[in-house]
Image: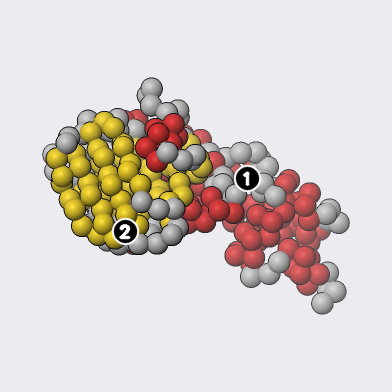
Amino acid sequence: MQLNPLLHAERVTGRRQSALIDLWSTTGFAAAVSEVTGPHIYEFGELPVPTVAITLYDVRRHVLMENGKVRRDAPVRSGRFRIGQPGRRVVVDAIPDTQWGKLLLLYLGEPLLKEVGTSFGSGPISLRDTAWDVDDPLLEASAKRLVEASDSGDRPNPLLAEQLAYTLALHLTDRYSAPRSGLAEPSVPLEAPVRDRIAEFVRSDLGAPITLAAMAEVAGMSPSCFIRSFKRSTGMTPHRFVVEQRVAAARRLLETSDLPIVEIALGVGFSSQSHFGVAFRQVTGESPARYRRLQCGRE
């Protein structure tokens, strides 16, 4: 775990990186984004871990060299991705078909791949070798959402960042893992007592940070297994469940107290009033202020 993904990405791109997600020291996952403004030679060096590069711009000519040999010389369409293999020395010469674009790099460390491997009844996962020749709507949509967060300065909260790391790792493993022995273990629905314990844990202190690892520990499961089982049992992700519990608590406070909305937002665990407003509207269809007025018969 000596790798510093952000420093590696900065050396590769020659540009300062934005740390969209940095869970490297705990989970083994990092996401970095950089701006592309013209032709550039990317010297990745010897890749230390499986690295997923997603281009969010069209590339007129893209020359990929591995260990001194040209592997691919062809255009790349926006949204295409590559899974780079550890141990290969990689150089990319890219001529974009645009004046501006974004490059997203995902670093997947051994702890994350080992953890995800347990969900498939095997050891650490090895990903297949792909080179910008596959469409993947989930990866493309996730990359665009992360870049939007970078542009707005709105970083994912810790629970959402953990969930995204495991979700992307599970998706990559399911779609692009190298042949392995054993079959994937089916996700087991959570029993009612376990769901009750998780709900009690979340509601006990909504204002405190809630992590995926902590929720999984309450369930007695690994994080990757927990995500799959929780969604199968409830129809929602752990992050969505926490958001809905926080909104439910906020609704009660809006109905029964005169507390300022910003105090309610922070008290139930949202990082700001604006984040609270977006989440509240997604769940209820109303803004917090209008919801309060409706409950008080003022509208």
Q: Amino acid at mark 2?
A: Val
For the N terminus, give its image quadrant.
top left
First in sequence: mark 2 or mark 1? 2
Residue at the spot x=74%, y=68% of the render? 291
Residue 125: give x, y in percent of width and height. Answer: 24, 37
- Element type where label 1 sits in the image: helix
Instruction: Determine whether 276 is above or below 224 in the image.
Output: below
Residue at the spot x=85%, y=74% of the render? 298
Residue under label 2: 59
Residue 11: give x, y in percent of width and height. Answer: 40, 34
Residue 22: give x, y in percent of width and height. Answer: 48, 36
For the C terminus, give its image quadrant.
bottom right
Q: Nearer the viewer, mark 2 or mark 1?
A: 2
What colour scheme governs how the chains and residues are painted in the rendered image of this protein?
A: secondary structure
Residue 211 or 218: which is nearer the viewer? 211
Residue at the spot x=43%, y=59% of the render? 99
Which residue is at the far front? Answer: 39
Horizontally, is 43 left or right of 68 in the view?
A: right
What number of labels is visible? 2
Q: Quadrant of residue 122?
A: top left
Q: Amino acid at mark 1?
A: Arg
Residue 177 or 222: which is nearer the viewer? 177
Q: Residues within 10 Å of mark 2 (few under 14, many from 20)?
A: some
Number of the label disc, if any, that sits on residue 203: 1
Residue 44: give x, y in percent of width and height. Answer: 31, 36
- Element type where label 2 sits in the image: strand
Work out whether residue 44 can be spotted. yes
| Distance (Cα) linking label 2 and label 1 | 48 Å
Residue 46 or 225: which is nearer the viewer? 46
